[in-house]
Amino acid sequence: MSGNRWEGLDEFVAVAECGSFLRAAERLRVSSSHVSRQIARLEERLQARLLYRTTRRVSLTEAGHTFFARCQRLVEERDEAFLAISDLHSAPTGLLRMTAAVAYGERFIVPLVNEFMAAHPQLRVEIELSNRTLDLVQEGYDLAIRLGRLSDSRLVATRIAPRAMYLCAAPSYLERYGRPHTLSELARHNCLIGTGDTWMFQQDGREHPFKPSGNWRCNSGEAVLDAALRGFGLCQLPDYYVLEPLRRGELVSLLEANQPPNTAVWAVYPQKRYPLPKVRLLIEALRQGLAQRPEYA
């Protein structure tokens, strides 16, 4: 195949994705005739028909489907490679849409994003604080901060901070009701329930889920902590809530041998080989900023 081997690939991918020569031309900011001409030359070089053309629609031939699967990835990787080099020294600009859980976002993430914004005033940021797991791809988000374990394989995840879960109770509660020494004893205790219906532990090297029950529930970690400090019952909370009360002796750590393996705080974004500079730089700023917090010291 002679000539420039990239010639016609952008036009072909655009038509395959848009399903229309006109929309592809609008995306590429060229004329429809240019798109048609480039694809015709590409088909001639390949000696294969890639598209079925009618007056109403454009569809891929069998050869077109095979070629499109490879070309789409090639074009994306080429563009990302150029972007990775050209943006090495560029400042983050444009709009960055991100999401985080409400309490963690308010306490940890938003202050660090504000510091980042102060250093890069040309950037615009929209932050959605929600305890609902938003679909980044469908809802158009560049970045999410997520806690615990991840399940969405369409996302790239970068660990930005540790996260350990602690089972705790106030000394006053333990004096009245005793201290649990095994997981089987938890069912006899009043449990302070937060956002999750299941507490995770480990036993004999395996995850051990436990369904807590009790007379108190609130979807706020700070509220759960306050109830635990008052001696209302047992709680399971992340490290950043309980480390200081544990150091001061206001809470006691329980069943440490069954503590679940450390999860993490994750920065996640839709799959791209090279994240945009604004995303990459903010992730690094969040990682460094969280490392300086006393909760993670």
Image: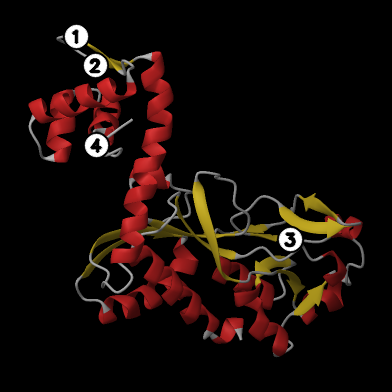
Q: In front: 209, or 86?
A: 86
Of mark 3 and mark 2, the one earlier in the sequence is 2
Q: Secondary structure at mark 2?
A: strand
Rounded to the nearest whole Å, what is the CA distance between mark 3 and mark 1? 66 Å
Q: Is residue 295 left or right of residue 286?
A: right
Answer few, some or many: residues within 10 Å of disc 1's Cα (few below 14, many 20 plus, some between 14 and 19). Answer: few
The colour scheme is secondary structure
On screen, 84 above or below 89?
above
Residue 138 at least partly seen: no
| Residue highlighted by disc 4 | 7
Label 4's element? Answer: loop
In this rendering, the answer to whether 214 lies above or below 257 is above
Q: Residues within 10 Å of mark 4 (few under 14, many from 20)?
A: few
Label 3 Cα neighbours within 10 Å, binned few <14 / some 14-19 / many ≥20: many
Q: Residue at x 28, y 81 (%)?
A: 119
- Residue 75's label in the rendered image is none
Q: Quadrant of residue 55?
A: top left
Q: Residue reaching furthest bottom?
A: 248
Q: At numbered mark 1, what does the secondary structure look like: helix, strand or loop?
A: loop
Q: Are marks 2 and 1 in contact (CB under 8 Å)?
A: yes
The label number, if any, that marks residue 54 in the structure image: 1
Mark 2 or mark 4, earlier in chain? 4
Q: Which residue is mark 3?
A: 191
Give whichever of 252, 34 is nearer the camera: 34
